Image: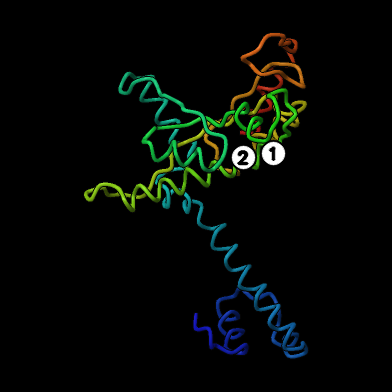
């Protein structure tokens, strides 16, 4: 779009493509500053509508979505076409980039690592929102690594960049079954390929140490069912 385009021309262009939600009469009665606000709103609406009607946007940009990428890797391992998948751990964008650039097929966002990076022992002092923030950073790191590999990789490398999938540590789901659903939703939006949940009581202890307690079998099943429903 030409930056020198005046407001009137901008409104006419937006109105023609049907993105503006205001009538011509209402536009004439508004001040120039409000008109600009309306124009900005209309542009935002147009962008949102484009994204909503382009469900394959992420897939076309990065080969395939992380869950599908992980599903293919697991299928290849299960069928004997590929060896067992090695999952080096990451806990932020930098470590995720290092894993991605090192050529691994997948990674795991470790709750132990996120806790340690925040200065806490792994006793669930780190909340869901802190883990979600780490998941967002990990997804950014993996995406940037994929782009970098395509840009500076082998000269004969073709095809779109493929960010390696990441399985996120979901601890106990950070509460009851409803919290488990929220965790699945949040990790999915962040770009995680899968999630691990535990049947420990909350607050939990690190799986590497002694003194752990688990919830009754029925409660553990509810967590699994909630995660599957959210998926």
Q: Nearer the viewer, residue 191 or 43?
A: 191
Name the residue beneath numbered marker 2: 134
Q: Residue at x 75, y 10 (%)?
A: 216
Q: Are marks 2 and 1 in contact (CB under 8 Å)?
A: yes
Give the label on residue 166, or none: none
Residue 96: x percent and y percent? 49, 39
Q: Nearer the viewer, residue 23 or 89?
A: 89
Residue 137: x percent and y percent? 57, 44
Residue 33: x percent and y percent? 73, 85
Residue 22: x percent and y percent? 71, 79
Q: Secondary structure at mark 1?
A: helix
Q: Residue at x 44, y 32 (%)?
A: 106
Q: Residue at x 44, y 39 (%)?
A: 98
Q: Nearer the viewer, residue 61 or 93?
A: 93
- Mark 2–mark 1 Cα distance, whole angstroms, equals 6 Å
Q: Total marks drawn?
A: 2
- Quarter occupied by the C terminus: top right
The residue positioned farthest toward the front in the image shown: 119
Q: Residue at x 32, y 51 (%)?
A: 152
Q: Quadrant of residue 219?
A: top right
* Local crowd size for mark 2, using a 10 Å CA cut-off: few (<14), some (14–19), many (≥20): many
* Local crowd size for mark 1, using a 10 Å CA cut-off: few (<14), some (14–19), many (≥20): some
Name the residue beneath numbered marker 1: 130
204 versus 169 height, above or below: above
Q: Quadrant of residue 39?
A: bottom right
13 versus 123 height, above or below: below
125 versus 26 height, above or below: above
Q: Secondary structure at mark 2?
A: helix
Q: Quadrant of residue 17?
A: bottom right
């Amino acid at each position: 779009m030409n930056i020198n385009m005046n407001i009137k021309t901008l409104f006419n262009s937006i109105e023609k493509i049907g993105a503006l939600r205001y009538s011509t009469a209402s536009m004439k009665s508004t001040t120039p500053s409000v008109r600009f606000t309306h124009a900005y709103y209309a542009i935002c609406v147009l962008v949102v509508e484009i994204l909503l009607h382009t469900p394959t946007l992420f897939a076309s940009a990065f080969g395939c979505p992380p869950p599908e990428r992980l599903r293919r890797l697991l299928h290849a391992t299960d069928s004997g076409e590929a060896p067992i998948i090695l999952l080096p751990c990451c806990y932020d964008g930098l470590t995720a980039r290092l894993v991605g650039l090192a050529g691994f097929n997948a990674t795991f966002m470790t709750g132990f690592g996120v806790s340690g990076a925040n200065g806490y022992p792994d006793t669930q002092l780190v909340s869901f929102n802190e883990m979600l923030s780490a998941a967002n950073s990990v997804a950014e790191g993996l995406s940037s690594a994929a782009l970098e590999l395509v840009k500076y990789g082998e000269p004969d490398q073709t095809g779109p960049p493929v960010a390696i999938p990441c399985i996120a540590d979901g601890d106990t789901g950070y509460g009851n079954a409803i919290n488990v659903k929220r965790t699945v939703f949040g990790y999915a939006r962040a770009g995680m390929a899968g999630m691990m949940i535990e049947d420990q009581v909350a607050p939990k202890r690190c799986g590497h140490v002694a003194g752990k307690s688990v919830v009754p079998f029925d409660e553990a099943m509810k967590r699994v069912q909630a995660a599957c429903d959210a998926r």
